[in-house]
Image (spheres, coloured by chain):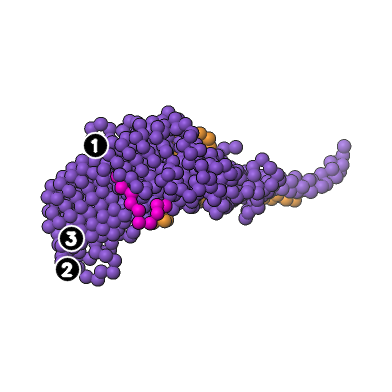
Chain colours: A orange, B purple
Amino acid sequence: MITLAVMGAIVAATLGALFSAYNQTGVVLNRRDVLGDGQIAMQQMTKQFRQATEINSSSAMALDVDTFTGVGAAHQIVWQTTGASAPYSLEVSTDGGSPKTVLSSLTSPDIFAYSDPEGDGTVNQVTIRLSLGTKTSTVVLTSDVEMRNL
Amino acid sequence: MTLTGLKREEDGFAMVTAVAVLAIMSILLVVVLTAGNSAFQVSERNARFTRTLAVAEGGLDDVAGSLGVNGAAPNLCAIGTSDACATSGGEYQVSWTRAPDGTITVTSVGYQPTMANAEITRKLEAVYQPVPSFKDVLSSDTSIAIKNNQVVIGDIVANGAIQLGTGSIVCGSLTSSAGGVDLQAGAKIVKSYDDGAGRTCFNKSGHVWASGTIKMAPTSVIEGDATASPPAGTVACPLIPDTTYAILSGMVQGNATACGRITASSPNPLSPYTLTDPSLPSALPSFTFDPNNYTSINCIPFSNPCDPSITSDIAYSQFNGLSKVNMKGVYAIWQKNPSQATRIDLTGLTAGGDLTIITNAPIYFGNTTPISSTGPALVTVVSLYDPPPFTTCDSNGGECSIYGLNSVLFDAGDPADPNDAVAAALYTPGKCAFKNEVNRVEGAMYCGSMDIKNGFEITYSTRIERIAGFGGVLERTLWQEISE
């Protein structure tokens, strides 16, 4: 009986730890995945906006630029958020093609802000702010991009 | 097996269970730590990726800085060699190429943490060009007069008086830092223009800014603002008489502001007796001959690198003996004791591509048939000839640094296409003059003094905005990241 009691306690404790660890691992993995998607999106956006040669249109939810993509001539790239309520999605399209969803965990659709740090009348800095909703919290990634060609 | 035996074999069961539980918990711990560490590694790699961009960009900045000071600066860490330049956060290698127009394309590769053990590599390419020095269509250190009924497209800047003949049109602006502006009957400063044959002009200011009186015939029009400023240091307006620094007669469609009286009509309220600052004197851009600005030079007399201090008595005749048909490339002609007797003769010139002629001798476009080209071509003509003191240069010639007679007609191609045919920049800190009215060019002309009242029709072209040798410092005009 004593052995059974001890085993029962140990099994209960083990299951509790197992369940807790499972949950924690899920939270950590979810946060890792969301953060990873956000970082990849941020990296793509900063790289493309940094070498943009023209801003075709801009708003808090979308930025349409002509930019280089590694080789050859410039392409038209549009980044925009979509959705009626959270979680919002972030999509990108190239040269008028169909949009591709890059991430779908945004808590706010307003991700772009613009400024003119030199004060010369040319808007050449964009601040990107991604509010990423995880299972338990919101992680915010922010980056200021100076558009080198504007 | 007895019951005692079975009981004995249960001994240690709790320990086995405990060990199994510990093993499971250890595995879970490893999983949790691995997940956390993975996120950390992703963040760390992102940080290093960003730092590598700064390393590569540091390479671009170093090249631009060193080439701006010394066009022959050596490359201490060339791409393709084993040498790398160290900078904060990593190492970089660079290379650059130079185009005939002075454009430099720089490639920089950033390595993190070092080139030998690179974990992250980023490659950037940037284009550097001379800063824009030719933004106006006509610029003179003295006065400028535009012939009757001629059309000039672009901004005109002078440090003396500006006169527009009867019926002439300027689509752009007029600025005189030390003189008045005289608009004769029907002369107009307009914001836009279309001759119906493709020669067009849009979105110009139509402004006139004089450091003197703006004298307008009753039928003349200024579509933009007109400002007549008194000399620098004036503390109150009007001066006596109030017909000085005034705007007299004509129509000003923008705002009219003058230190003196205003008799021009305007749809807007007039601002007479108003003190305004005069425009700053315009300075011709200075030219510096640097052989490193060019990929190759036809240097007459020959020297390598081409040295302006090595001159020849017969440099002009050597050049004049060359065929002027489909000429292209860079020619630097250094004449000993240059004079009108040793002038460079460009009669019969046609361009086979971009052409740059630089000389310390006078340049003559005599009875030149249309200067055509085999395709789009930039023609840059620079005369550094300094005429003797107290000599004149006018439509009849004389001591001119650049002189054209009769048909000096640069082929502008399709007037509606600014990028075809010939765009020309004519520059001299000395004197220039052209005779007769069929002279025409698309580009710009900058002279220490200028006599074109006999006729010179010109349309500004941004193609000649940046020219090697002018402007000094380099300006980045394109930046991009290259995929490796």
Seen at 21% across and 41% down, the residue is B149
Seen at 24% across and 61% down, the residue is B229
Depth order, front residue of B20/B399: B399
Seen at 63% across and 54% down, the residue is B87
Q: Of tags 2 and 3, which is closer to the observer?
A: 2
Q: Is residue B392 magenta?
A: yes
Q: Position of residue B134 (x, y in %)?
A: 39, 47
**Amino acid type of disc 3?**
Ala
**Amino acid type of disc 2?**
Ile
Mark 1, residues whose alpha carbon is within 10 Å: few (<14), some, or many (≥20)?
Answer: few
Q: Of tags 1 and 2, which is closer to the observer?
A: 2
Instruction: Tell whether B402 sits left or right of B117.
Output: left
C-alpha distance separating marks 3 and 1: 31 Å
Which circle's residue, 2 or 3, is located before the other in the chain?
Answer: 2
* Residue to which mark 3 is pinned: B246
Chain where mark 3 sits: B
Q: Write down the region rendered in magenta.
A: B386-395
Q: What is the number of the mark on residue B240?
A: 2
